[in-house]
Amino acid sequence: MIILSAGPGPPSLSLANRVNETETVSKRIDLDSELESRSIPNDVLHEICRHALDVAPEECCGLVIGTADDRFLRAVRVTNVMTKMHVADAKAFPRDARHAYYMSETEYLQAIGEAETRGEKVSAIYHSHFGHGCYLSQDDLAFAAHPLFPFPDAAQLVLSLLGNRVREIGIFEPTGAPEYSFVGRRLEAAN
Ligand SMILES: [Zn+2]
């Protein structure tokens, strides 16, 4: 499950108000093994893996900043504050940071602002699944399809962690189809 706050003004995204909006999103999306993998600079991939391992068994989350020519320039860690949200309101936030993430709004807005100042953008967002596979879950999909989702054009990177190692990394890219779906491929370090 992934959840982001929408800030003051618009209603915040939460599982509580999304549950009834997810009927059109029926199942998770796995990696398509028939498709060629995509590549990402080794240092960016290393930083994302490091982040995932640093916070395990909690889920990590963050952004990948890039440009039209250089899609993956660097990763920006964002604090997963889901445990804090869960402790404050367990009914609205039934899971903690081991099973869901909630990006610190202050941090991701700051990262977006800095990127825009440099003429860059958020090319991808990332999060990890500890003890689970590499796929976009039903909740991940429901969130991405939400009208308040802050990164509608971004790809989603998912890291699958097993024990103390990263088992698999996938990139899920929006297809551009009206029903808003994704295609998943393996992600590898560029040479
Ligand atoms: Zn997920």
Image (tube, rainbow, N blue to C red):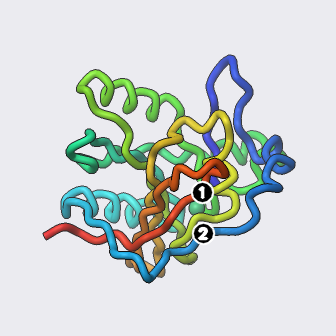
Q: Position of residue 33 (x, y in %)?
A: 45, 82
Q: Is residue 173 above or below residue 87?
A: below
Residue depicted at 27% across the width and 48% down the height: 71
Residue at 59 percent across and 45 percent down: it is 102
Name the amino acid, label 2.
Ile
**Disc ID at residue 29:** 2
57 vs 176: above or below: below
Mark 1 burial class by Cα count in 10 Å: few <14, some 14-19, many 20+: some
| Quarter of the C terminus within the rendering | bottom left
Is 62 located above or below residue 109 in the figure?
below
Lateral position of residue 61 relative to residue 101, left or right: left
Q: Indicate the secondary structure of the residue bearing disc 1.
A: loop
Mark 1 or mark 2, earlier in chain: 2
Residue visible at 82% across and 44% down in the picture: 16
Of residue 102 and residue 42, the one placed in the foreground of this image is: 42
The answer to which of 189 and 2 lies nearer the viewer is 189
Other residues around mark 2 within 10 Å, as few (<14) / some (14–19) / many (≥20): some
Image quadrant of ligand 1 equals bottom right
Residue 183, percent from left and from top:
50, 65
Q: Is residue 123 above or below residue 175?
A: above
Q: Is residue 135 left or right of residue 113?
A: right
Camera sees residue 15 = yes
Q: Which is more toward the observer, 24 or 93?
A: 24
Q: Quadrant of the N terminus?
A: bottom right
What residue did someone put label 1 on?
181
